[in-house]
Image (cartoon, rainbow, N blue to C red):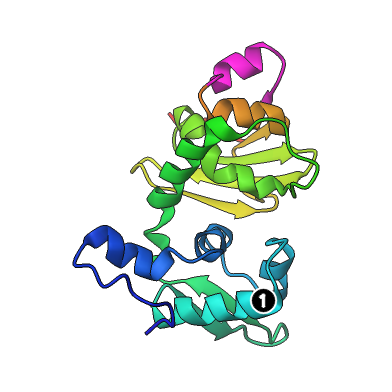
């Protein structure tokens, strides 16, 4: 069982917070939703977390059956962390949190770290009108890709996608506007704030 103390309340929300309510836990889930990650990669994309804290949280998450650790075969021979099926079920939770938090995003503060793929979850809803596609998003801060599903499910990953159907080139400010509903994707393209390029035929 995880080391975190329980709220000891017979309540579904309290039980959920027993597992994911600690500082950094949901941000680790955010990173692992993009796919398996090595410890060093997780630490690099979670600026501000100490090595001891990250190791402890990962151990807690393994105990809660949210995360598993496995070793990649040679020649890589490295250990990676990845979400279990139960861990991946937290995507809707993070989507709801991102939608709730988006209005609080103003200009980045001087102390704020920024990673391109942190915009993936807030953009999932804005990209749904594109249908079941693989969308590669390019920002000044880097690239990530989103897979929108016809079944309403979505996935995202860090970096470029070799099988991208569409390439979206924009900036962090436009991502923020799309995330909090200030703009639609069509409006952003029409205003020249985003460029949408088909790299594969759209599905019929």
- Identify the residue position indicated by label 1 in the image: 39
In the rendered view, would you say 33 is above or below 139?
A: below
> Which quadrant holds residue 171?
top right
Q: Give the range drawn in magenta.
A: 182-196
Residue ID at (74%, 46%): 112
Image location of residue 19, percent across then percent down: 38, 70
Residue ID at (71%, 82%): 76
Which one is nearer the viewer's eye here, 30 or 102? 102
Which one is nearer the viewer's eye here, 173 or 3? 3
Q: Quadrant of the N terminus?
A: bottom left
Image location of residue 67, percent across then percent down: 47, 75
In the rendered view, would you say 53 is above or below 114?
A: below
Image location of residue 44, percent across then percent down: 74, 65
Image location of residue 100, percent across then percent down: 45, 37
Which one is nearer the viewer's eye here, 81 or 180? 180
Q: Quadrant of the C terminus?
A: top left
186 left or right of 10 in image? right
Could you tell me if residue 106 is visible in this image? Answer: yes
In the rendered view, would you say 5 is above or below 200?
A: below
The mark total stands at: 1
7 left or right of 131 in image? left
Helix, strand or loop for disc 1: helix
Could you tell me if residue 85 is visible in this image? Answer: no
Crowdedness near tag 1: few (<14), some (14–19) or many (≥20) residues, C-alpha within 10 Å: some
Which one is nearer the viewer's eye here, 89 or 138? 89
The single residue placed furthest to the left in the displayed view is 10
Residue ID at (56%, 80%): 56
């Amino acid at each position: 069982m995880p080391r975190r103390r329980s709220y000891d309340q017979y309540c579904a929300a309290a039980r959920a917070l027993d597992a994911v309510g600690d500082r950094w836990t949901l941000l680790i889930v955010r990173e692992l939703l993009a796919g398996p990650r090595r410890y060093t990669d997780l630490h690099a994309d979670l600026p501000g977390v100490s090595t001891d804290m990250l190791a402890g949280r990962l151990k807690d998450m393994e105990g809660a059956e949210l995360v598993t650790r496995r070793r990649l075969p040679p020649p890589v021979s490295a250990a990676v962390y990845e979400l279990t099926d139960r861990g991946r079920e937290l995507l809707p939770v993070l989507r709801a949190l991102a939608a709730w938090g988006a209005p609080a995003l103003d200009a980045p503060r001087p102390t704020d770290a920024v990673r391109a793929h942190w915009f993936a979850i807030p953009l999932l809803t804005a990209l749904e009108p594109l249908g079941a596609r693989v969308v590669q998003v390019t920002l000044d801060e880097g690239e990530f890709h989103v897979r929108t599903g016809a079944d309403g499910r979505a996935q995202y990953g860090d970096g470029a996608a070799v099988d991208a159907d569409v390439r979206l080139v924009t900036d962090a400010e436009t991502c923020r506007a799309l995330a909090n509903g200030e703009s639609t994707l069509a409006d952003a393209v029409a205003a020249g704030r985003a460029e949408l390029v088909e790299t594969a035929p759209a599905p019929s």
